Amino acid sequence: MHARLGDRLVVESAVTGSARRDGEIVGLHHDDGTPPYDVRWSDTGEVTLVFPGPDARVQHLGQEAPAPQPEPGGAARPDTGAAPAERPAGHALQPGDVGRRVAAARRRQGLSLEETARRARMSPQYLAYLEAHPSDPNVATLIRLADALGTTLIELQGGDQERPPGQGHALLHPSLRDLDEGECRALLSSHGVGRVAFTTLEGPVVVPVNYDVVDDGVVFRTAPGTAPASVVGTEVAFEVDHVDDTMSQGWSVLAVGPAEAVTDPEAVRRLEQRAHSDPWAGGGRTLWVEIRPTRLTGRRITPADR
């Protein structure tokens, strides 16, 4: 049995040959199109992992669709093939937690919906549905999405929300390598929260900030008179990292350089237009601070065979 994305899986009665259930194949687990498949069933809209049995066949795109079959009680069920998104008026749905995390991870990686779907071996229509509606995809689907998006199953499921990072076991054969400047800049641009380290009269301080990378500079907003505002005119360190507890690997990037206030009205306007989000701390944060890295270093831990 071989299938392509968009084909239909039809489960038939072994006695009469009449269709009992069918659904769209929205995910492949093997490049050659062999089972198992992720199938979105026409009758429920649910997506499940299916290992087809002898009573199942693949209906390829362009083939004639099976005729509608009577439901118990004699009422015919139209085989529309509609996605679960096509619901009666008044049933407006909002993205679920999984969909929001998938969409956020995709935006962080700068991937289109089509490219993400191709990497995860699923249909773009199903991925669009997943990002826009409450849904409960199976673990196999989430694993493929996590791999395509460079994240983890736990992160997509939200299981890491209250768990401190670094609780996983160390790799048996880890490889620690230095990152070049290009890799550091790429990773620095992929996140939105980092830590500014600086020295005060009371001692060293590390403060988390929402940040953006604009024209190779690290920029963040703060309020005049606050601790982060005191870094203006000094040399600071800025750090960002990623820890994958499930795979026991991760990376960190450290930028060191002078911090200066952005005061030119045109430059401020440009930063405000390019900012991805408001500071989570809220309040009136009108002071833009820019860190121009003079030294950029990073390291990554992976299995030794990679």
Image: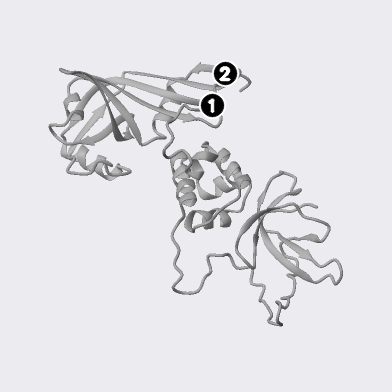
Pinpoint residue 292: horizontal percent, then vertical percent: 28, 24
> Between 189 and 37, which is closer to the camera in this rendering?
37
Of pointers 2 and 1, the one earlier in the residue sequence: 2
Q: How is the image coloured?
A: one colour
Q: Which residue is mark 2?
A: 174
Pinpoint residue 71: horizontal percent, then vertical percent: 70, 77
188 vs 146, left or right, is left
Distance between mark 2 and mark 1 Cα atoms: 9 Å
**Does 34 sit above or below residue 199?**
below
Residue lying farthest to the left in this orientation: 225
Q: Residue at x 61, y 23 (%)?
A: 306
Q: Residue at x 53, y 56 (%)?
A: 135
Query: How busy is the neighbourhood of tag 2: few (under 14 within 10 Å), some, or many (20 plus)?
Result: some
Which amino acid is tagged 1? Ser
143 vs 188, left or right, is right
Q: Residue at x 21, y 43 (%)?
A: 269
13 vs 222, left or right, is right
Image quadrant in which you'd find residue 262:
top left
Residue lying farthest to the right in this orientation: 15
Determine the secondary structure under disc 2.
strand
Image quadrant in which you'd find residue 56:
bottom right
Which amino acid is tagged 2? Pro
**Does 101 sit above or below residue 43?**
above
Query: How busy is the neighbourhood of tag 1: few (under 14 within 10 Å), some, or many (20 plus)?
Result: some
Q: Which residue is mark 1?
A: 248
Pinpoint residue 81: horizontal percent, then vertical percent: 64, 68
Asked if marks 2 and 1 touch (Cβ < 8 Å), the reply is yes
Pinpoint residue 62: horizontal percent, then vertical percent: 72, 65
Image quadrant in which you'd find residue 63:
bottom right
Which numbered tag is attached to residue 176?
none
Determine the secondary structure under disc 1.
loop
